[in-house]
Amino acid sequence: MERSPLHITSDLFSQLLLDSIMSSVKIEVAVKEQCKLGESPLWEEKENSLLFVDITGKKVFRWNSLTKEVQSVPVDDVVSLVSLRECGGYIIAQGTQFVALDWKNKSLAPINNVDWDKSNTRINDGKVDPAGRLFAGTMGNEIRPAVIERKQGSLFTLMPDHSIVKNFDCVDISNGLDWSLDHRTFFYIDSLSYSVDAFDYDLPTGQICNRRSIYKMEKEDHIPDGMSIDREGKLWVACYYGGQVIRIDPETGKRLQVVKLPVSQTTSCCFGGPDYSELYVTSASQEMDEAAWSREPQAGNVFKITGLGVKGLPPHSYAG
């Protein structure tokens, strides 16, 4: 049957819709800090603020989106994540230790340690689940960016009573993680597997099982790093050395959208802003020479992406 000139297939309609969305996307620098290794962006709604860390710069930052003021707390070791805490303040990971951070007093109080039997690992990315448990993984110490002693890491859970549970080991670089909208699936990235994986998730116990790959990275994606879910159940993955964030459908395993940034070392992302319609992306500037700086003068800053047409979810708070 001959098609009319106005006939539009579903694939073509999807592409036209995506083209329309991308034409309205805006990328700007939100926080000018030029971190060595910016990571762990986290929106704190009550403060209208974005939290993030500079891992090797050994600082925790808080940027107020209304006043544009940037505050920071220096620490004594690499600091890889920051999470909200139900009783107030924050939880950070410093080396292999979980630590409570009182922002007002700039004080730190140790909570518990992981990998106490190892001297060559540190905690990397982490996130709080819907029941208030903090999931965080470790990685071997880096020889240079993304080059490590393999299979030294593990995935742990810091329970609300401050006890530690090891979920599994033989991890290269434990990285992005999140949960499905119905809380029945746990999404996880071990960076050097070049895959986004899924597990069945039991919310009452926090147990995971039945690991499978739901997305294999394309060559141009490079290394999967931090990750965040949107209100449509799609995953946004920052691509280290790829200079982009990608949106993937965990049900079909398809890449839906690519947003390019003006820096190559994109590390993690989170939704924030008054209605969680802004995507914040951290980046790094480690091991950049003069030529690299001339190509990427905005490296290490935190970027804000608007106009994506989707919204994210508020982060959960640690219950301990």
Image (cartoon, rainbow, N blue to C red):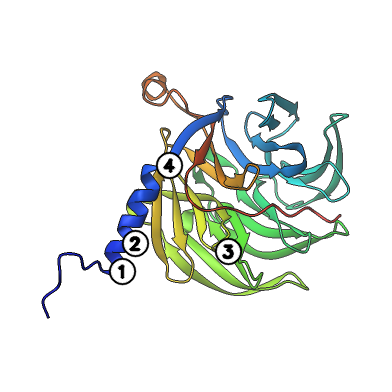
Q: Secondary structure at mark 3?
A: strand
- Which residue lies under the disc numbered 2? 14
For marks 2 and 3, give the one nearer the viewer. 2
- Which residue lies under the disc numbered 4? 25
For marks 4 and 3, give the one nearer the viewer. 4
Q: Secondary structure at mark 2?
A: helix
Q: Residue 96 at what x, y percent from top left?
A: 73, 46
- Which residue lies under the disc numbered 1? 10
The reply to whether callout 1 and callout 2 are in contact (CB within 8 Å) is yes
Q: Secondary structure at mark 1?
A: helix
Q: Work out how far the residue at label 4 is from the one at label 2, CA to CA, in angstroms.
A: 17 Å
Residue 264 placement, left or right of 62:
left
Q: Earlier in the sequence, mark 3 or mark 1?
A: 1
The reply to whether callout 4 and callout 3 are in contact (CB within 8 Å) is no
Q: Earlier in the sequence, mark 4 or mark 2?
A: 2
Image quadrant assignment for residue 7: bottom left
Q: Residues within 10 Å of mark 4 (few under 14, many from 20)?
A: few
Image quadrant assignment for residue 168: bottom right
For marks 3 and 1, give the one nearer the viewer. 1
Amino acid beneath label 4: Val
Q: Residue 303 at what x, y percent from top left?
A: 52, 34
- Vertical order, 278 against 62 (above or below): below
Q: Earlier in the sequence, mark 4 or mark 1?
A: 1
